[in-house]
Amino acid sequence: MKPEEAIEHARAEAARKRAAGDYREDSATVQKLEDAITGPVTPQQLREWALIDVDASLMRSTRRAGAPVTGFKRLLLRLLRQYTNELEAQQTRFNVGVLARLEELERRIASLERK
């Protein structure tokens, strides 16, 4: 399969699985993701994406009897909270730093283009 065909293949496969009832998904989340993938990236989106905020309520299992699996995942998340919080903080600091550098470079380019 060519990379250009991958997204269409993934969408078709997801539609097939949705129709078969294999998994449920939040349509608002899917729409936000599709907008983010297909639309132009704005500076506001970059700022939003730079900040990592894990929503534990989105953690679930897509298996038929997935409640025990979801419970186990949430237990693990709770047990590892200190570790994951530190990872999230480090990654957020890095993302914000990269974004600040990118904005600085864009300002420099704009000022050089004006000259």
Image (cartoon, grey):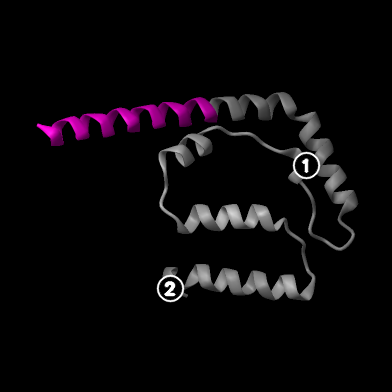
Q: Which residues are magenta?
A: 91-115
| Closer-to-camera residue (94/55) | 55
Residue on which the image places disc 2: 2
Image position, residue 66 (x, y; %)? 86, 56
Most extreme residue toward the left is: 115
Q: Is residue 31 above or below residue 52?
A: below
Q: Please name the predominant secondary structure of the magenta segment in the image.
A: helix
Residue on which the image places disc 1: 57
Q: Is residue 45 magenta?
A: no
Q: Is residue 111 magenta?
A: yes
> Badge 1 local density, few (<14 within 10 Å), some, or many (20+)?
few
Residue at image location 77% in from the left, 35% down from the top:
77
| Closer-to-camera residue (7/72) | 7
Distance from disc 2 to disc 1, alpha carbons, whole Å, reads: 35 Å
Image position, residue 93 (x, y; %)? 50, 25
Q: Amino acid at mark 1?
A: Ser
Image position, residue 68 (x, y; %)? 90, 50
Residue at image location 18% in from the left, 30% down from the top:
111
Badge 2 vs badge 1, beta-carbon distance below 8 Å: no
Q: Quadrant of residue 52?
A: top right
Q: Is residue 109 left or right of residue 99?
A: left
Tag count: 2
